[in-house]
Image (cartoon, rainbow, N blue to C red):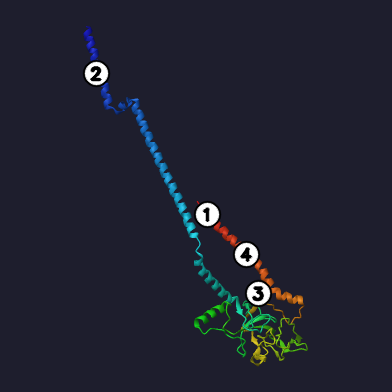
Amino acid sequence: MVDVAHSGSSKDNEDEGDGRTEQRDGDPDATAEFAGPEDAGSAAVDSASVDAASVDSASVDSGSKAEAGSETRAGRRRARKKAKKPRSFWKELPILIGVALLLALVIQTFLARVFVIPSESMEQTLHGCAGCYGDRVLVDKLVYTFGDPTPGEVVVFKRPGTWNQSEFHSNRSSNGFVSWLQDVGAAFGLASPDEDDVVKRIIAVGGQRVECCDDKNRVLVDGKSLDEPYIYWTPTAPPTQASFAPITVPAGMLFVMGDNRNNSSDSRYQGGGGANGLVPVDNVIGKVRFIVLPPSRWQGVGDHDPQVAATAVGAAWQYGMPVGAGLLAAWPTLWLGRRVRAALRSTGTARSAGDEP
């Protein structure tokens, strides 16, 4: 009885064991459920490794992009520095010379021009005699656009066709190229001109009657003696003016004389005197303002009105007026130049700051 009972219990136990084994083999979840702790740890490590690899890859990509951006900005800065690098002096020199000559030509054509005094008829106000350094004078060409010439002004004018005596002697070379260089130099006041332009002082204008002389050897205009402190008497001639017949100056004409009163071919003699010696206002090129060369004679040219009896103080004030006007004009010019330079520097700084990252 005992043996039978023992045998049946063993078989049942074997069947139950077989059933549990088959369930584990057929069900993956069941298999995982019964997986050991070592297998679970391996899966967690693998997942963490994948996540770390992803983070490392993102970090590398971000670093590469940042490095590339930094290199791009550095490249832009280098390009800007290279673009702002100034040209060499020898490359800029021809450009500067060309611009300077162009500006000088424009200025001398429309605003002012430098003339060489070729004769001694305006001594000592202007030097031009043989053996002297010919003065270069700056002539204002714009002044008579807004007004008419007045007595006492020193003017440059084209020689009228009625004038038959010339104080001009051309010194042009027979060599064509050298003559061309002299013409270019004359355009900028660096050589004597080839045209017969004349420099004289206005004594009377249209509607006035001129004659010479009173009992003190002075020229009269409208019956009044002139005050002429600028007259120069040459040491080789007596300080006496040659008399001439009275003449009434027509409208639009000028009566002119040289300051070197005994050595000047002017309205008293040209064309035989009278109407032939007058100068049309339309022939006037401009008013002499300054002596610009040589440096030892830098000064303004006075325009003392001889028809007004002036005190010594008044005459000195008029002679110094051009220089004073130049000094007064220099201050606002310098101030404006500083403001423009400061504005340009500020603009350049702001532009550079805007280009920075």
On the picture, is 93 further left or further right than 258? left
Callout 4: 10 Å neighbours few (<14), some, many (20+)? few
> Circle 4 sits on which residue?
336
- Report which quarter residue 245 is drawn in: bottom right
Q: Position of residue 142 (x, y in %)?
A: 62, 76
Would residue 318 appear left or right of 98 to someone viewing this image?
A: right
**Residue name at image x 43 percent, y 47 percent:** 65
Disc 3 residue type (three-letter)? Ser
Q: Which label's residue is closer to the chain start, 3 or 2?
A: 2
Which quarter shows the N terminus? top left
Can residue 224 be seen in the rendering of this structure? yes
Q: Amino acid at mark 2?
A: Asp
Question: Is the Cβ of the residue at disc 2 closer than 8 Å to that at disc 1?
Answer: no
Name which residue lies at 44% across and 51% down: 71
Q: Label 1 belongs to which residue?
A: 354
Within 10 Å of disc 1 (Cα), the crowding (few <14, some 14-19, many 20+) is few
Q: Position of residue 336 (x, y in %)?
A: 62, 64
Q: CA distance from mark 3 to mark 2?
A: 137 Å
The residue drawn where x is 49% and y is 57% is 81
Q: Amino acid at mark 1?
A: Gly
Which numbered circle lies on residue 15?
Answer: 2
Q: Secondary structure at mark 1?
A: helix
Which residue sits furthest right? 215
Given contact means CB atoms under 8 Å apart, are the residues at marks 4 and 3 in contact? no
308 on left or right of 77 = right
Q: Nearer the viewer, residue 32 or 221?
A: 221
Which residue bears the numbered disc 3?
296
Q: Quadrant of residue 227?
A: bottom right
Locate residue 171, reporting x and y percent: 57, 84
Quadrant of the rendered image containing residue 246: bottom right
Say what secondary structure mark 3 lies in: helix
